Image (cartoon, coloured by chain):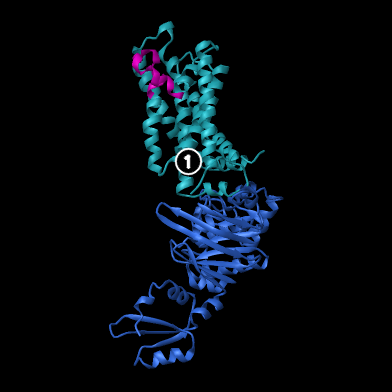
Chain colours: A cyan, B blue
Amino acid sequence: MLDWYPIFLKEMLQFKRKLLRLGYIFSAMMAPIIYLITFGLGLGRTVTLSGGVDYLTYLFPGLVAMSSMNNSYSWVASTLNLSRLYFKTFQIYIQAPIHPLSIMIGEVLAGMVKGLFASLLILFVGLFLPSGFKINEIFVLALLLNCFMFASLGVITGMITKSHEDTATYSNFFIMPMAFFSGTFFSIERIPHVFKPFIYVMPLTHTNILIRKNFLDTEAVLSLFAVLFYCFFFFILGYLLIKKYNE
Amino acid sequence: MILINNLSKSYGKVKALDSLNLEIKKSEIFGLLGPNGAGKTTTVKILTNLTKPESGLCYIDGINVLKYPQEVKKIIGVVPQENNLDRELTVYENLLIYGMLHKVKSLKKRIEEILSIMELTEKKNAIVNTLSGGFQRRVLLARALLPEPKVMFLDEPSIGLDPHIRRELWQIIRKIKIEGRTVLLTTHYIEEAEALCDRVGILFHGRLIALGTSAELKKNVGEYVVEFFNENGEFISEVCHSREEAYEIAKKRNNGVTLRKSNLEDVFVKLTGERIRKIER
């Protein structure tokens, strides 16, 4: 039952070593802080939102979602790609008498921890900002599901990419547009109708809807189901890719 | 202990293995010898579940490798050609993770034991990246031995090591045999195959072209070798079945003739015909 634990432990040992190099913490915080300053404190002062919400309060949960997505996804995709193609450490898992599902669980949990850690750093910065943002149960649920969803997507990318450069390509084509067009910086209501179907297909859109809710209304429930669907879909696909591993 | 039946595998248009048949006995060190691309690593990858063949069957200790991979994984240890230790982790952490993956009982005690056997106790807390190539190879062996596997796969275990370290490694491999384990060793070092293997199989373009003990193989192709430069300045190496035959060839040459006993490289050259075409009588 606990076959996933050595995989998770290995990732955590490596993560701990990276944390001890302080550069990691600063680099993980850098992009969200730049966005906070530029969009929140800079441009944000000129933005007025319906319902009297100040822009920083609107932006902050989106930045947490974006940061958790980036870190959960990139860490898993990148380390899996490198360990599979260059360091060949992934082969140790394949040659061990454990179920492929355990490999998937270990990788996803490790990705979640990395995503949550980056989110906690942003939340820490948020303590010092003049916003009306408050954490509630829906926020926590959305954050956890978002980390799970993108760590699972990271496994898929890590398993299908044929070189490390491919990881950056996937990131540029899927993750980067999602970060900007899924309601992180501005409401998706402002996007022209013709593009909306594409926006609603993006998983982060639904996390952004959910993470800003104070209670589960119809829109939140629909987004929750969408996130749960993506979590399931990405997880199963990642698991099948590990199961079908063949050099 | 290992049985391979008609195993074939292609990578695109390249045939890596072409109907390979092989039987490896219990407690023997079997050497798969061949040049790069002969199919040695592909054979190991199939037997250790990293890749699937197009056709054929293979069994380890009576277990069908393709049908029951999880059962096979419990009884094998692998030292891959490429160093796949976690380089940012310590020696101990590498062994710990591997031991947990293989559900080794009394793991901490077993790690201490294997560290002591492999003379790695002092390096226990060293980050793998800081170790020399020789020590890293030793850690790879220690890791593979940790779950006490019945069958060991050593894929080019001494590649890139200097001769002194290579000989140290050979001692360790001999110890593995004494413990009663079956070893499948791939190498393209003739000297290594001769020094370690009870039997040798020569692979060439995915086909097994020779099988037997080193002595048998040499006897089959000829135990004596005459080497000289011909009139065009080309290096000629002729394998002969008898000393008399070798003397006859040597006598026809005026100078620069070397007469020696054959080795597995001569067997390989003779069987593959790679250099044999140059021989002129």
Q: Residue at x 56, y 77 (%)?
A: B216
Name the foreground residue: B266 vs A86.
B266
SS at mark 1 in the image: helix
Quarter of the figure with residue B175: bottom right
Q: Residue at x 43, y 22 (%)?
A: A201
Residue B70, x across and y down, in percent: 63, 48
Q: Residues within 10 Å of mark 1 (few under 14, many from 20)?
A: many
Q: Quadrant of the N terminus of chain A?
A: top right
Q: Which residues are magenta?
A: A180-203
Give the chain letter at badge 1: A
With respect to residue A149, does A1 lie above or below?
below
Quarter of the figure with residue A162: top left
Quarter of the figure with residue A5: top right
Q: Is residue A182 magenta?
A: yes
Left or right of B183 in this view: A87: left
Name the foreground residue: B194 vs A167.
B194
Residue A110, x across and y down, in percent: 55, 36
Residue A241, x across and y down, in percent: 51, 39
- Furthest residue in direction right, as rendered: B106
Magenta stretch, main secondary structure, is helix
With respect to residue B234, does B247 lie above or below?
below
On the question of residue A187 being in view, the answer is no
Residue type at numbered disc 1 = Met
Q: Residue at x 44, y 66 (%)?
A: B35
Q: Is residue B112 magenta?
A: no
Name the foreground residue: B100 vs B187.
B187
Left or right of B196 in this view: B278: left
**Which residue lies under the disc numbered 1?**
A159
On the question of residue B249 being in view, the answer is yes
Residue B44, x across and y down, in percent: 54, 57
- Furthest residue in direction left, as rendered: B232
With respect to residue B265, does A58 lie above or below?
above
